[in-house]
Image (cartoon, helix red, strand yellow):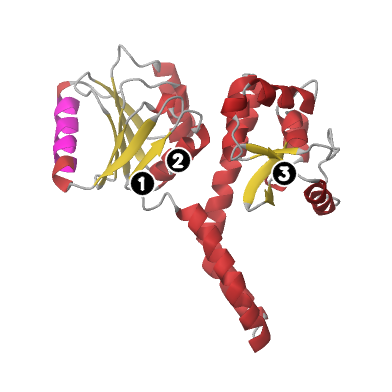
Amino acid sequence: MNELKENVDIKDLIYEIRGKQVMLDSDLAVLYGCKNGTKEINQAVKNNPLKFPDRYCFRISEIEKNNLKSKVLTSNYTKGGSRKGNTVFTEQGIYMLATILKTKVATEATIKIMDTFVKMRRLINENKDVFRRIIEIENDTSYIKNALIEHDNKIEELFDKFNRKEDLKSKLFFDGEIYDAYSLLVDIIGKAHKEIIIIDNFVDKVTLDILSKKKVNVMVLLITDENKSKLTKTDINKFNSEYPLLRIKYTNAFHDRFIIIDNNELYHLGASLKDLGKKVFGITKIEDQEYLKQIIKKVNEASNMCPIY
């Protein structure tokens, strides 16, 4: 992993094939520290066919493989470096592979890969108007403008893919869709400007990993059951040493799981944050403001009855 950090940017290993963002099995073998290379990865897929449908991974043709080679000729990613792999994995397939390999290296690499996909989406979304304006200024001819009409349509399709989660009303996740669930929760957390309230009785360090994606100045109140939580005061203190403004309140007053953003948006979670994607569950945005007021009132009542750490 030390060689990886020094010599490669993960975003350089993400390619678009058949309209999907994917990674090669040969690159994943290096990232996951597979001693037998792609053989170990392909064996994992072969042994778990139901966990790897076509939308998770697929074989590429020789033409696609040759086109891909031409794109990476200038790559400085030479560790392990041949591009001999013929299998590619989508985001969901990447995380599914990590859950099967179950190694520390695979887990750490997968988190870095997920973070890279999230950053790429945000970068494109935040700068789409700038990109389009630069193209218009530098190519101000009628011929180019006509060509850009089709180009803009493709850009809009790409932005639609990245923006699907912004207008969330409800979303259902099936077992194995860990990355999608993780990404959506990061997006919800990232919307907060002042305060995040998380109500979840079963929390552990996975919850803190998600909260690390919050804006630095956003205060977080975590409400949980002390008898069911796996977080220690040491965990909380370490988190606050790097990502301040986390407070935790112990109470058994709640059964379901909720997230409140800036006292303005209320989300209901069908599973604890630590179990994202392990089983079928849903995330729903509750639009009724009266429900939001009632939940906030219960939070305040519980906070007044018990100390906040």
Q: Are marks 1 and 2 in contact (CB under 8 Å)?
A: no
Residue 32 is situated, as x and y percent measured from the top left of the image, at 70, 27
Mark 1 crowdedness (10 Å alpha carbons): few <14, some 14-19, many ≥20: many
Look at the numbered disc 2 and give the secondary structure of its residue: helix
- What is the magenta range? 292-304
Badge 2 amino acid: Val
Residue 105 sits in which quadrant? top right
Relative to 76, is 251 above or below? above
Residue 308 on the magenta span: no
Of labels 1 and 3, the one closer to you = 3
Look at the numbered disc 1 and give the secondary structure of its residue: loop
Of labels 2 and 3, the one closer to you = 3
x 30%, y 15%: residue: 226
Residue 258 is situated, as x and y percent measured from the top left of the image, at 28, 33
Disc on res. 13: 3
The residue that disc 1 covers is: 192
